[in-house]
Amino acid sequence: MQVSRFIPRRLYVSFSRLTAGVVLSAFPFALAAQKTALHVDGTPADPFQEAAGKPVVLVFLRTDCPISNRYAPLIRRISAQYAGKARFWLVYLGKTATTEKIRRHETEYGYQLPALRDQQHALVAQAQAQVTPEVAVFDAHHRLIYHGRIDNWYEDLGHARPAATTHELDDAIQAALTGKAPPSSAPGVGCYIADTE
């Protein structure tokens, strides 16, 4: 590019570097704005900022995943048990999870928890989630301390125990609240999360 004869070269180069730096520094924020979770009403959501220094529990599910739906009573019970101590969010995946479908699903399964839509998989990546249902527990400093199954009720697809014998989600929340060592992350059993949905 030819430098204008009316602008000293040194000033022009400095100005070029400055404008390039502004563009490059703004670029990651533009990407972040494009890839974010949403409240059900479509407004951008940051579950960590809204948690006010409490542990955050993300529950990944789909309206059409049978195993996710079978866990609804347990998710309701655990979230009620830790109300006021940890912040729970239902995270709905898939572009077909419209506002209407989510509201209908919440009513059908008795959910009274705040819900998010993660169409761009921003929270999926942050939580390293792979299937639904799966949970991620972050401590009060927003560090991921556990991700994986809720418990071991399901051994495999179509094979469930009469009752769970391990309780990873409950143990992970206790660890987040007390500072004790969390359980080892264990893979969930359910509906795989596709890279693009």
Image (spheres, rainbow, N blue to C red):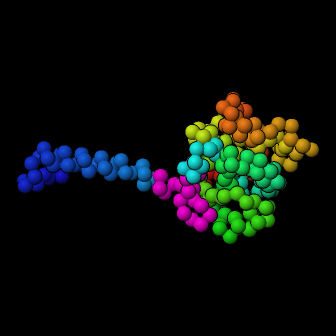
Question: Can you tell which quarter of the image residue 184 is in?
Answer: top right
**In the rendered image, which quarter contains the C terminus?**
bottom right
Q: Quick one: 89 or 64, which is closer to the camera?
A: 89
Q: Work out whether residue 133 can be spotted.
A: no
Q: Residue furthest bottom?
A: 100
- Report if residue 38 lies within the magenta region: yes
Residue displayed at 79% across by 61% down: 109
Residue displayed at 68% across by 45% down: 85
Residue displayed at 39% across by 51% down: 27
21 left or right of 78 in image = left
122 to 171, vertically: above or below: below
From which residue to which does the magenta span run?
Answer: 32-47
136 to 1, vertically: above or below: above
Question: Can you tell which quarter of the image residue 61 is in?
Answer: bottom right
Question: Can you tell which quarter of the image residue 97 is in?
Answer: bottom right
Residue displayed at 76% across by 66% down: 107
Residue 59 at x, y = what percent? 70, 50
Counting the numbered discs, the total is: 0
Q: Residue furthest left?
A: 5
Residue 14 at x, y = what percent? 19, 45
Q: Work out whether residue 83 can be spotted.
A: yes
Q: Residue furthest right?
A: 162
Residue 146 at x, y = what percent? 67, 38
92 left or right of 153 in image = left
109 to 174, vertically: above or below: below
- Report if residue 169 lies within the magenta region: no
